Image (cartoon, rainbow, N blue to C red):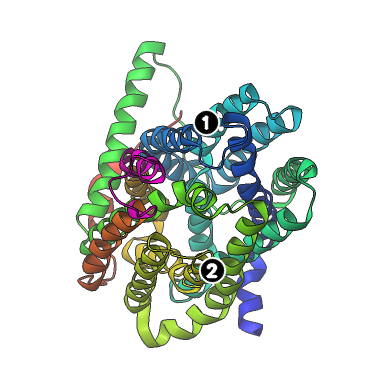
Amino acid sequence: MEGAKELLKPLIHLLLPLCFHWIAEEMTVSVLVDVTTSALCPGDTTCSPAIYINGLQQTVVGIFKMVMLPVLGQLSDEYGRRPLLILTVSTTIFPFTLLIVGKSKEFVYAYYGLRTISYIISQGSIFCIAVAYVADVVDNSKRAAVFSWITGLFSVSHVLGNLLARFLPQNYIFEVSVALLLFCSIYMFLFLEETVKPGPKRENSLSFLHGVLEVIQARYTSMRYAATIVVTSQTLKSISIVSFFYELGMSGISAVLLYYLKAAFGFDKNQFSEILTVVGMGSIVSQLAGLPLLNPLLGEKGILCTAILAAIAYALLYGLAWAPWVPYLSAAFGVIFVLVKPATYAVISKGSNSTNQGKAQGFIAGVQSIASLLSPLAMSPLTSWFLSSDAPFDCKGFSIICASSCMVISLYFALTLNLEAPSDNTLEENEESIEAPLLS
């Protein structure tokens, strides 16, 4: 316990505001299903427009995240973690403020527009930059445990957020959420310390057009460099494939799950909060205590494979759910599959040099965003079809069963994963001359 305190002490001003940020976001999840359905399909439990607009949002976010995540990862390497973290955590304030003003169809559409922009900037990048921040201050041998504690804190925040959603009146949820988000941004601005020395800035003596062309060239060069880092490392290449197929299945399930439960079993805000709380409470134990204890015994690969196997069981139970209590049983597997993320972060961190942490994490997060772009293209129409009266056979969760096959592929590649230490600085030295700051 004393060792844990020493490791987490330099991270307190990172973790405390992130905890409030996650609470603020999670407490709105279960309510948004009811708000969206009520605005777009008044009086109905099945709402195809809500499923489609959710899928459209995820597709658009996936398209732009492919560029934004590597960009933000590189910017955090060059200009510091602090300004990028403050930017990313602040974007959620505006869409939720809109729902305080009104919850009509027009406001819901406007919310989705602003929330899409917010997701493009913040979804995935907050974790990506936070993990790079941890890599700056924590020794390589201790990072797996710290990553697990961070994702455990993420689960604690989710439980607190869901409890607030369960017991707070719906009219106050967005107000409380915005207040917490404001606190988070202000706290980071006042107390978060920088861990990266900003890169050198070049003289701005070129013409505007020439400068724009140089920025584009620098972006291409940097993306190529980040891709080279991943492709030349067998570990990073393999974990990117694992992450792609896992995210392809899991993001597709996440996009439609609550709408599926509402249509199939009539679940509302309270049931959603209860299910999400079941997952969160178990996740706290597994991430804060389970992974640090299991890591010396199983290693990152063993934990990763076990967690993906649990995710497959989770998906199949949801897809085949035959009674309202089955989703609660399925949610229990969240205790194990939440370990996919910290295990993945640890594998990426071990497979990359200290100077390339942000680039490697950002590039593989970009690979995951490609998966989150593709999954709703199939999941949204398939889910809507099998929830309708025109379904070819009676299996409302058929799309979720299909998504589980992607995680089976992910498990296969995880089993073949070979962990190796990062190569020496030869690649970095050869490529250093073509690396240029993104902004100048």
Q: Nearer the viewer, residue 54 or 182?
A: 54
Q: Badge 1: how crowded within 10 Å, few (<14), some, or many (20+)? A: some
Q: Residue furthest bottom?
A: 297
Residue 325 tag number? 2
Tell me the SS state at disc 2: loop
Asked whether the viewer can see residue 170, the reply is yes
Relative image position of residue 263 (x, y in whole percent): 51, 48
The residue type indicated by label 2 comes to: Trp
Relative image position of residue 187 (x, y in whole percent): 74, 48
Return the residue at label 1.
117
Relative image position of residue 195 (x, y in whole percent): 56, 54
Q: In the picture shown, does residue 21 fall above or below 408?
A: above
The overriding secondary structure of the stretch rendered in magenta is helix
Asked whether the viewer can see residue 193, the reply is no
Does the magenta portion include 367? no
- Range of residues picked out in magenta: 374-398
Does the magenta portion include 379? yes
Instruction: Give me the residue at 36% from left, 76% from top.
Output: 306
Q: Nearer the viewer, residue 418 or 335?
A: 335
Q: CA distance from mark 2 to mark 1?
A: 36 Å
Tag 1 or tag 2, which sits nearer the N-term?
A: 1
The residue type indicated by label 1 comes to: Ile
